[in-house]
Image (cartoon, rainbow, N blue to C red):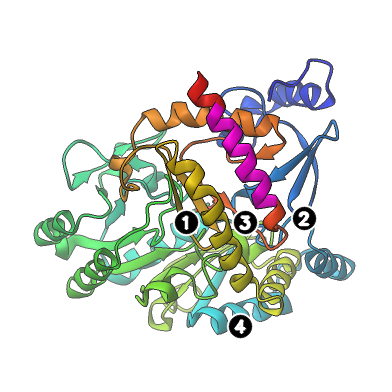
Amino acid sequence: MNANTSSRSHDLFERAQAVIPGGVSSPVRAFGAVGGEPPVIVRGAGSSLFDADGREYLDFVCSWGPLILGHSHLSVQKAVAEQLTLGTTFGAPCEGEVLLAEEIQKLTGVESLRFVSSGTEATMSAIRLARGVTGRDKLVKFSGCYHGHADHLLVSAGSGLATFGEASSAGVPKAFTECTLVLPLDDEAALESLFAEHGSEIAVVIIEPIPANNGLLLQRPAFLKRLRELTLENGTLLIFDEVISGFRVGQGGAWELYGIEPDLVTYGKIVGGGLPVGAFGGKREYMDHLAPLGPVYQAGTLSGNPLAMAAGLATLNTLQKEKGWEKLESLGQYLEERLTPILESHDAKLVRQGSLFWMSLQSGDAPRSAEGIEASAADRYRHIFHSLLEQGIALAPSAYEVGFLSIAHGEADVDRLAEGLQKALRGASAH
Ligand SMILES: *Cc1c(COP(=O)(O)O)cnc(C)c1O
């Protein structure tokens, strides 16, 4: 969006840049990948966002996943308002954390669970726990999977297959990345040779079973099964990072969808109903290694925060009461039917899992690994993104980020997206 210079949104963003690095609290919001200036948002309602100049955007980002009920859903408003009158934090066990943990156990089957305040904290804590349980140091991750910004996870693949990672951020000591190995997704042979060489040293493998942070790289079930077999054979713990996929692709997440049970699982985004929450859990025999029962330390002043627990619980209850996952699957199908012919006539493809979607802007089959994404896609996306934003439709400001539907979205919203996309792609080919 080219905010005109007299707009309130523009003024606020100028002021933001004077006091906050890049004007943002999380980097992708700055539009670095697509150019231009982000609108400053003052309000959300249902499937819409409103900026400081009162401009409306049909929102397919949904705060990057948490808002599966849409913005300001009444059930969340009520639950938070009610808790607000009772207090915002106690620094002691509270009822909300018991209720939410029981609800998550009922929906997913996880035996034991601890709450934290972000997805980053959830994966960081789950990895420490896995290392504490196994007494080993090495961590394996996959290129194209994102697990938050803990030091040992800010690692990208070096050259060659199974590689010791290189830091993908300044400020990460080499000693941290030396314990992290990076593998490509969708590649059983690489997995097998890594385990043949290092199997007895590997504490833990972490994967997004539905990788949704670098395109939507849907994995073959056979690959995930092989990963489960090899980790079991080698005494390595397997973490499914379901911070995006948990409560998004169905009530039991990817774990249920693929019928593959990890040792530990991480949640975030939807479990907080729009407030800052993460959680990690798994088999009780492992979770009991955490303090105060065991030797693995982990803590948080605002962990299990009553306001956030209320928002998460209201979200999960509403999803069940309103048959949310069924509705989202059928709306997702409708989106696929509308967008597929448009994209295919422009040498692109729609990739979808439930209410998660991504446009693969290259010819041929949709990629299953980060290495399979062509660099030209980012250029194509930049134009599409800005054309849609000008039409009042907000997709994520990066070619590598997925789109989200909420139960506040309807077929008319999808129609608007389809028409907007048609227009954007026609404009793009005219360039
Ligand atoms: C968003 C995300 C995280 C990080 O969560 P934050 O709350 O942003 O720290 C970790 N893993 C996955 C799969 C995510 O999508």
Q: Out of 184 and 392, give the one closest to the viewer.
A: 392
Tag 3 residue: 405
Task: Answer whether residue 425 is magenta in the image.
Answer: yes
Which quadrant of the figure has residue 11? Answer: top right
Looking at the picture, which amino acid does disc 4 mark?
Glu
Using a 10 Å C-alpha cutoff, classify the residue at mark 2 as few (fewer than 14 neighbours), some (14 to 19) or many (20 or more). some
Q: Secondary structure at mark 4?
A: helix
Cβ atoms under marks 3 and 4 closer than 8 Å: no
Reading the image, the residue beneath label 2 is 46
> 172 or 29, which is in the foreground?
29
Tag 3: residue type?
Leu
Residue visible at 56% across and 63% down?
299
Q: Where's residue 111, x and y in %?
A: 48, 83
Q: What residue is shown with label 1?
A: 352
Range of residues picked out in magenta: 413-426
Where 333 sits versus 110, above or below? above
